[in-house]
Amino acid sequence: MQRNTRVILRKRPDGTATADCFDIEEVELPPVAAGEVRVAVEFISVDAGTRTMLRGEGFHHQVGIGATVLAGGVGRVIESRCDGWEVGQAVRGGLGVQRFATMAASQLEKLDNTDLPLSSYLGVLGGLTGITAWIGVRCVARPAAGDVFVVSAAAGGVGSLAGQIAKRNGATVIGIAGGERKQKFLTEELGFDAAIDYKAEDIGQRLQELAPQGVNIFFDNVGGRVLDAVLDRIAMQARVVICGAVSQYDDMDNVVGPSMYLRLAERRSLMEGFAYFHYPEEIPRATGELKSWLAEGSIVMPEEILQGIERYPDALAIMFSGGNLGKLMVAV
Ligand code: NAP
């Protein structure tokens, strides 16, 4: 009988989610019930938000101790007991960090006419990556020509696309990311106007040099001291878009809030948060535009793919130490 390999949560992380918080388990596959399909998982998405699901309570779904770690994935149906779902069908959904997912077909999305590699449906076209960037920029941040648009975690999955979309709208784009490799990536490969290395440079001082009139839009993925440094440099009538706060996810009981928020009042500015699923009606348009930009080669979405499901705990650690360029995934 075929067996499943899955990554389960052994204990809740105290701080960084280290490898000893997870176990890799081999279990027997359950039979496929009526209405269900069995999917051979091909790629698993590694997302910053997963860290918040490991803590026991929170905004999103939670992973129980001993349960399979939750994650989006793509794969193909290998067994079906549901009418209309054929073997070989490509699918996307909450497949979890496992080799095979056995679940109700109704919880899955069919991927038809897959003219792109399956991994793209988690990266550039993924809800938690490309679609989030598109919705965050087009529906919430709404940059216009002449705006100074700053994005944090700029070299990651969401940030690298958010900056490219803002550039298409005519904004001057400045990315904040850690390390020299990422500075080069942002300016030389993604075409950002400038980059700030928050690990080696003073963000406020660099913004003063690069945007002396202030920042019109800040698309924040990091929170904490990065958010404060940019708040201190916002222009009049700026917009601060809260996409995420990855610097806070390791210790959600002691979130460091912005101490510079009074700049919003001084500068008649707004702060607005969003989640991509608040804009379901925009997803088809986002998908269509991202696909066409990709086809014409006017955006790029680098992918970093670790081989083997057992690398998933490493992948999370890599993400939280800033090791990834673009979308991080695990190939099963
Ligand atoms: P990602 O940007 O590919 O990876 C996270 C990056 O954050 C790392 O590469 C690292 O880059 C940076 N980082 C990690 N720890 C940090 C720390 N302590 N301080 C500062 N920077 C740190 O991850 P992603 O999955 O695409 O997510 C990016 C953000 O989007 C997250 O905040 C996530 O929660 C948010 N998100 C929001 C939605 C929504 O609907 N609102 C949906 C999906 C994701 P450096 O080398 O630059 O440090």
Image (cartoon, grey):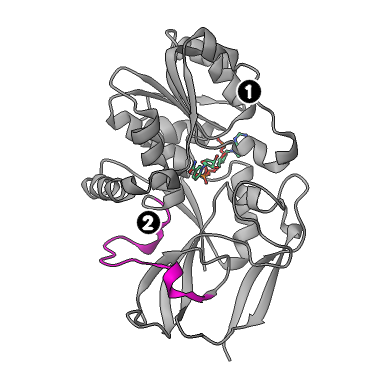
Residue 184 position, x and y percent, is 45, 32
Question: Which corner quadrant of the image does residue 139 belong to?
Answer: top left
Please report the residue visible at 36 percent of the width from the left and 40 percent of the height from the top. 134
Q: Position of residue 13 (x, y in %)?
A: 75, 51
Residue 258's label in the rendered image is: 1
In the image, 39 versus 42, the foreground residue is 39
Decide if residue 90 is on the left or right side of residue 4. Answer: left
Highlighted range, magenta: 101-123
Query: Ligand 1 near label 2 (Cβ, under 8 Å)?
Result: no
Vertical relation: 332 (above or below) 31: above
What residue lies at 58% left-to-right and 47% top-to-bottom?
49
Image quadrant holding the N terminus, namely bottom right
Q: Mark 1: which amino acid? A: Pro
Q: 175 or 98, which is in the foreground?
A: 98
Horizontal and vertical percent for residue 199? Answer: 62, 28
| Residue at screen point 60% across, 30% down | 223
Query: Where does ligand 1 appear, by image quarter?
Result: top right
Q: Amino acid at mark 2?
A: Ser
Element under disc 2: helix
Q: Is residue 40 magenta?
A: no
Q: Can residue 270 be seen by looking at this rendering?
A: yes
Measure how far apart labels 2 and 1 are at the Cα level: 35 Å
